[in-house]
Structure formats: structure tokens, C-alpha cells
Amino acid sequence: MSQDTQTITLTTAQAIIRYLAAQFIEIDGVRTRVCGGGFGIFGHGNVTCLGEALYNQQEELPLYRGQNEQSMGFAAAAYAKYHLRRRFMFCTASAGPGTANLYTSAALAHANRLPMLLLCGDAFQTRLPDPVLQQLEHFGNPTIGVNDGFQSVSRYWDRITHPAQIVQSLPASLATMLDPADCGPAFIALPQDIQGWTYDYPVEFFEEKTWRIRRSAPDADEIADAVAALKSAERPVLIAGGGVQYSRAVAEVTAFAEAHNIPVIETIAGRANLTNDHALNIGPVGVTGSDSANHVAERADVILSVGCRLQDFTTGSWTAFAKDAQIISLNAGRHDAGKHRSLPVVGDAKLGITALTKALDGYTAPAAWTAEAQAERAKWNDYVAGNVKPGNRPNSYAQAIGTVNALCDPRDRVVAAAGGLPAEVTANWRTLDIGTVDVEFGFSCMGYEIAGGWGARIAQSESEPDNDTIIFTGDGSYLMLNSDLYSSVLTQKKMIVLVLDNGGFAVINKLQNNTGNESFNNLIADTPTATHQVGVDFEAHAAAMGANAETVGNPAELAEAFKRAKASDTTSVIVMKVDAYDGWTTKGHTWWEVGTPHITNSDRVREAHVDWESSRSRQRKGV
């Protein structure tokens, strides 16, 4: 401590880590650190200074050694999602390519509105040794580097050019990450020399602070407008998005639906807002949805969207709803609340839905409408039961999902991402408990599955250590990013990974064929440059990283392997081949806008273009 007892002399890096260790949040009456620790890969841009600071606070802020910077970011995103955005992890990477590898992760967190703190090395502030190792030079502007690119995928961005700046920047970063409307990644660029420079920091800067998640009450006039629209509804429906869970408003949304007898449909991010057997759960909506939810979405005259971004897989590229349907959008973010001529209700989901419940006292949806929705759901339940049944066709995603669904614990967490599995899990998974499904489709990022599963398991082990994290991944995503199998073994964070091998990027091959194109460069068998056709031994690969691994031939063998995985305390990988052509869920899809060639030499492509465009007349126009 300096002679002035009101300050303490620390390096910039030491001050950052000491500050983070002093930040707390209260969750369900329990006070805990808001930062759960971090993921780090060291290099010359962060090991000497930030590494020294982290070593001295490793008890308060545990550092998980990553295998790949992108996967570290995915793990941090999944950790924040598990904790409903009330806790976050930091990621630290070296200057240059290490930091650049985090760009995709930051984009995923930005799209999904997830908090993540990126502490990344940067070139020297003095520029004395320029150009340095891994520096990206811009001849006309020496202030620009790799880190500047993160401004497009960060909610908060700063470059520390003097040690005193973190007194302002760190609180601003946390305030952004914990704000329901502005939530997302915060990026702090740390020049290598600045990290080690010292400053006499105010002692009070490091005093413990307990953060609160803001709940903004909606405007009374906006509530009144929404109530008037709902009272006029003959066929209302509620879309429950991921924001319902982030607001911890599941109970209030459920009570609202029950009080007013309004059918509920779920987005991909909103899966597991209601259990499968709830009478008002009409199913998932949209491109990867259910016939039941899409039926009521198309017929509804008033649509109450709660905590939803209304992206194209929910809206069927804005063909899923009647053109004249009135949308009411309750959302903490002004940007999301005003989409497509919605009546905006800007505010917290829990406070907003509570206000709507009170104001709608006495209103219930017509019984015939709710009965119609429930009848459609019963049909969908019958379809799913047949769709997941082993032996109904060659091995399929749906069969694997149904097998695991029947054997897992209600509180086990399911993780999937990108490729064909988000659609298959969304359509076929029958939710057993609230908040147990993580299908990453906000950025639709292949490679999230295993890394995200590791991050989710770290979070799950803090509060639900006896439950499992179950990951569904295709062979394409597995090959893209699998190294955190090793991370899970090293850290004893057990996962159960289902590798469903369909011989390549089969879902994009399906899209290719559905638009009249020939199979090309998606399935390994249809890749002209793959002149040596050889399969990957996923079992041997996973075993080489320390996981239990086995290959099964059918769903019955999968069931027995899954039981063994449940009984083990080590990460297990179960591999099963599935059919690339006849293994898909064929119902439950709305139209989705994709670009198709307006001119072509192929009759099949031309016919597919005409057929695809024939649904555009149903597209809702708006902003």
C-alpha cells in the first residue's frame, strides 16, 4: 500500500482481477461472485502480466485452461445461459490470432444477448517495438488492429491506454453485461505494456459490491394498449421466448396463460418454458416447429410475444402469422419490442406479464379456440410418438432423441446447436422440467455443442452436480470443434455426448436437394475432391482424449450405452450412424426464405425456385 492510505499501487492487470473478485450478485438469497472465473489460453500478449495477476487470485477466480479460444467463448456463453445471465465468465487470449479466434464466440454471445467478458492482449501502447509479433499493421492508421474488429460484436468495447481508465471501464462493462436490455459481450483490449504499468488506485474501487439485475416496469399507456388489443382477441396466442427464462418469469407467464386460457407456443430459445404435458403448451413454433403451434400461429388474430427476438425461424420469414394479426411485443429491449408493427411493451417480462394479468381480469380466450389448439397438439403428440419410435425407418436423429428422452433425468440439461439437430431436438424433445434445454440457434453456430456443453456442465456442477449435461452433435460439428472433450476429462466435468454420424453436412445437403440442386460438397460421399473415401473412427478419437467411448448400431444399443454413461462419472461419447436422407422429421415446418437462382440451366432448380417463391404471397411486410 502507498503512503497515502487511501490508495493502493497495483499493475493494471492486478487491479482488473482484484476488482472482478470483489463483485457479487445475490441469487435466490445466496450471495455469490458474479464472475464465476474464466477460460484462458496464454501467449506473449497476456501471460506475463494478466497471468501473474490470475495466479494470485485463482481461489476466487478459477481459471480453466482452454484448448481453443473459440471454444472457450462458447463455454463462457453456455455458462451464462445456464445462470440466466446472472453470472458470467471471462475469456483471456493473447494478442493476434488468439484474440481473433474469439470473434465467432463474441458474435454468438451478441446474437444471443449473453454476458461474456473478453480480456485480450493488444500491441504496445508506446509503439517502441513496432511492428511486433502477430501485429496486424494498417499502413494509414496505426491505431487499428485485430481488436478493433470486435466493436461490431460487442455491447461494450474499450482499449485501455492508461491504467487509470479501468476505474471507469470495468464498472461500465459489468453494468452493460448485467443490463436486461443491453446484455451481451464486453471487450477490453489490453496493450501488453499497459498491463504491467502501475497506478495508485483508490482503495474503495476494490470494495465488495453486490449487483442487482434491473427490472424496468412497462409504461402504463403501453400496457393499456396491449390490454385493449387482447380483450378484442377471439384467437389469442402467447409466444414464449428465451427472455421469459432470463426474467425468471416462467411462473408468471404460466399463471397468465392459465388465468386467461390462452394457448402458449415456444421459440427455439424458449424451449422448456413449459413442460411437455402442460395443457396449454401447444408446441414449438416456426421453421423448426410443430404443426400444432404453426396452426395456431397462422390462425391467431392477436399474438402476445414475450421475451422474443422474432427472428425468421420463429416467424417463418414472416409467413407464420396472418398478415392482419396484431402483434404485441413485451421485451426489455426497445429494439426487439417494436419489430413488425408490434404494439411495444418495453419492460421486464415478469413485471409486464403481471401487469397484463391484473388488467385483463375477467377475460378468457374463447373455449372453442383453446380446444382447437389443444386438439392440434394432441395430433402433434401422436406424430412425435411415431417419429421417435425405433424401427420406424433407418436410424434417425429423432429415434436417438426419443431414446435419450425416455431415459434421462428431468433435470438433465440438453445441449444442441446448428446443423440438423436444432430442428430435430426442438420438434421431438418432450420437455421434462423447466429450463433444461439449450439449443443454440441465435447465431446457429456449429461447434458450440461440446464446448457449450463443457461450460454448461461447469455451471450445472455448481448447483445440480448429480444431474447430467447431454450433448447431441452431428459428425460435421464434432469434426469442427471437439477438443473440449479433453477439457471435460481434465476438469472432471462429466458430459454425455451423442455423436450422430450422417456422413457430412447432411442438413445442408437436404436444403441443396430441396432447392433442386445436386448433392455437392456437403456429404463426404458427394465431395469431388475427397478422392480417398475413409470414415472417421469417432470412438477411437474420443477415447484418445480420455473419454469413455463406444459405437452402437441401433437405438436399442444406444439405450444400453446411455445407461452405462449415466452410471459413469467420466465423460462418455456414444457414436451411432444415422441416415442422411430418410432420417428427418418431415412435419412441423413453415416456409423459410432462402435465396434461389432466378435463372438457371437446370429444370429442377427452376421448378424448385418457382415452388419456393409461391409462398411469398403470405409474407408479412414490415420493418
Image (tube, helix red, strand yellow):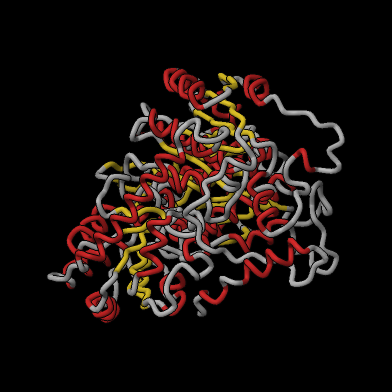
State the image coordinates of residue 117 (x, y, percent, origin top left): 53, 50
Q: Quadrant of residue 179?
A: bottom left
User: Does residue 465 appear left or right of residue 480 in this picture?
Assistant: left
User: Does residue 135 appear left or right of residue 542 in this picture?
Assistant: right
> At 47% from the left edge and 42% from the top edge, which residue is drawn?
79
Asked if 117 appears above or below 396 in the picture, the reply is below
> At 54% from the left edge and 38% from the top edge, which residue is drawn?
397
> At 45% from the left edge and 48% from the top edge, which residue is drawn?
427
State the image coordinates of residue 528 (x, y, percent, origin top left): 85, 43
> At 28% from the left edge and 45% from the top edge, which residue is drawn?
277
Asked if 126 appears above or below 551 in the picture, the reply is below
User: Does residue 328 appear left or right of residue 141 in this picture?
Assistant: left
**How many numbered tags mark residues here?**
0
Asked if 153 appears above or below 501 in the picture, the reply is below
Q: Which of the two residues, 540 or 69, is positioned nearer the viewer here?
A: 540
Q: Which of the two residues, 45 or 286, is positioned nearer the viewer here?
A: 286
State the image coordinates of residue 23 (x, y, percent, origin top left): 40, 48
Q: Quadrant of residue 468?
A: top left
Q: Can residue 18 be seen from the camera position used here?
A: no
Q: Can residue 398 be seen from the camera position used here?
A: yes
User: Does residue 113 appear left or right of residue 195 in this picture?
Assistant: left
Q: Which of the two residues, 547 or 204, is positioned nearer the viewer here?
A: 547
State the image coordinates of residue 75 (x, y, percent, origin top left): 54, 41
